Image (tube, grey):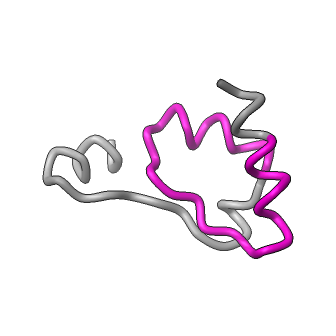
C-alpha cells in the first residue's frame, strides 16, 4: 500500500539497512513495487544476483 501511494504521488520508495539486505525478503520487496534497496557495499553483489534470479 505504501508503494502504491508513493508511486501515485510520483515519489520513489525504498528500504535501507539490514532489512533491505535480507535476501530472503528480496522477492517480497520486488513484488511490493519498491524502487530501491539500499544495502552495504558487501551486499550489493549478492543482492544483484538474487534480483536477477527472481525475474
Q: Is residue 32 left or right of residue 11?
A: right
| Camera-nearest residue between 55 and 33 | 55
| Res. 37 image quadrant | bottom right
The answer to whether 42 appears left or right of 51 in the picture is right
Residue furthest to the top in view is 55
Q: Residue at x 38, y 58 (%)?
A: 13
* Residue situated in front as seen by the camera: 23 or 44: 44
Q: Give the farthest residue toward the left.
A: 9
Relative to 37, is 11 on the left or the right? left
Q: Quadrant of the N terminus?
A: top left
Res 22 quadrant in image? bottom right
Q: Residue at x 73, y 69 (%)?
A: 18
Quarter placement of the C terminus: top right
Residue 36 highlighted magenta (yes or no): yes
Is residue 48 toward the left or the right of residue 7 in the image? right
Give how far across and how far down residue 34 sits, in percent. 46, 47
The number of numbered badges drawn on the structure is: 0
Q: Which segment is the magenta one? A: 23-49
Using the image, determine if residue 55 lies above or below residue 42.
Answer: above
Provide residue 27's location: percent of width, then percent of height: 66, 35
Work out whether 15 lies above or below 51. Answer: below
Q: Which residue occupies 54% across, 63% down?
A: 15
Q: Who's the residue at 47% across and 37% down the image?
A: 32
Residue 43 position in % (x across, y down): 81, 64
Q: Looking at the picture, does residue 43 appear above or below residue 26? A: below
Amino acid at each position: 500500500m505504501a508503494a502504491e501511494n508513493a508511486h501515485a504521488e510520483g515519489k520513489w520508495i525504498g528500504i535501507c539497512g539490514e532489512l533491505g539486505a535480507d535476501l530472503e525478503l528480496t522477492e517480497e520487496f520486488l513484488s511490493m513495487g519498491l524502487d530501491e534497496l539500499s544495502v552495504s557495499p558487501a551486499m550489493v553483489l549478492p543482492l544483484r544476483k538474487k534480483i536477477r534470479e527472481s525475474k
